[in-house]
Amino acid sequence: FAETPSGVWFSPASGKTHTSDAIKNPSIVESPNMTDFLLSQTWTRMGEDSRGNCCKILNCGLGLPMRDAIPGMQRLEVRDTYRQKILPHLREFDPDIIFISAGFDAHKKDSMNFGYVGMVEDDYEWVTEQLVRIANTCCNGRIVSVLEGGYKIHGGIVSPFARSVASHVRALVDGGKSRELYDLQDGEWESQFERHLIDERERKRQQKIEKMRMLEAQSRQALYGDGDGEGADGGDESNTRKRKRNQVDYRQLYEQMKREGFAA
């Protein structure tokens, strides 16, 4: 950190959207010598206002999904939040090392977030890949991850928690081998491509729903007509398969049965 002209820490978090003054207006932040800052333990005597103004803290709150939300859009919102708000600031900060508090309670099956965030294993792997690329670009791949949370542990090694941890570790290992660097334009293209895939899946889903509605309506019409016993053209009996009952004169039927010997 000592060679970083812009300041002290960078810590993306969760909760209400908030960007500290140290990010919005770095020129107002005092940047003491890092050695003096740590050895004098200045950070232990800082008030909340000072702590919020000097520390580079970026909270990115996510809106709750609507009842009719398009499937997959919540995950895209999480990724786009990293692409547009977190990763560019982190790259600009140019860290000497990155520490990750690796929590997995944002998984869609974790009861901690009631499924509102909706992340899956692939999302944790993707976020980790992006952070490794930043580390490869800024600090020769120096990155440390510490397990923090995740509570859907039922199922052991196949639980959502275990699978998420495995995805995270796999991305750390693969990223260290590939040494791929961070590129903002790659993120922009990836966002557009993912949005196209979601729109295409939603279009096909709506077509399937509409087709099922049409088949259901046709089946209902074939079985019951239009509810009043008439066909679709209003009175055309040839368009309905509902059997028509004829009026029966039971007295006349009885007399006929006696004449034919079927009744006493």
Image (cartoon, rainbow, N blue to C red):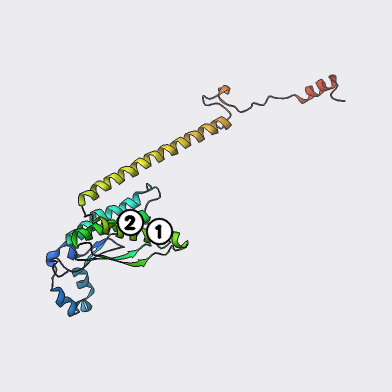
Q: Judge left or right: residue 114 versus residue 194.
A: right
Amino acid type at circle 2 is Glu
Residue plotted at (29% across, 62% down): 16
In the rendering, which numbered label is found on residue 179? none
For residue 225, say whether it is visible: no
User: In the image, 32: left or right of 143?
Assistant: left
Mark number, residue 163: 1
Depth check: give the residue in front, 176 or 155: 176
Q: Which residue is mark 2?
A: 125
- Secondary structure under tag 2 reads helix
State which quarter of the image contains the C terminus. top right
Count of all numbered marks drawn on residues in the image: 2
Residues at circles 1 and 2 in contact by the CB criterion of under 8 Å:
no
Q: Secondary structure at mark 1?
A: helix
Residue placed at 21% from the left, 76% from the top? 43
Residue 202 vs 7, above or below: the answer is above
Placement of the N terminus among the 4 image quadrants: bottom left
Question: Residue 64 placed where, x, y %?
Answer: 36, 55
Among the 4 quarters of the image, the one containing residue 211: top left
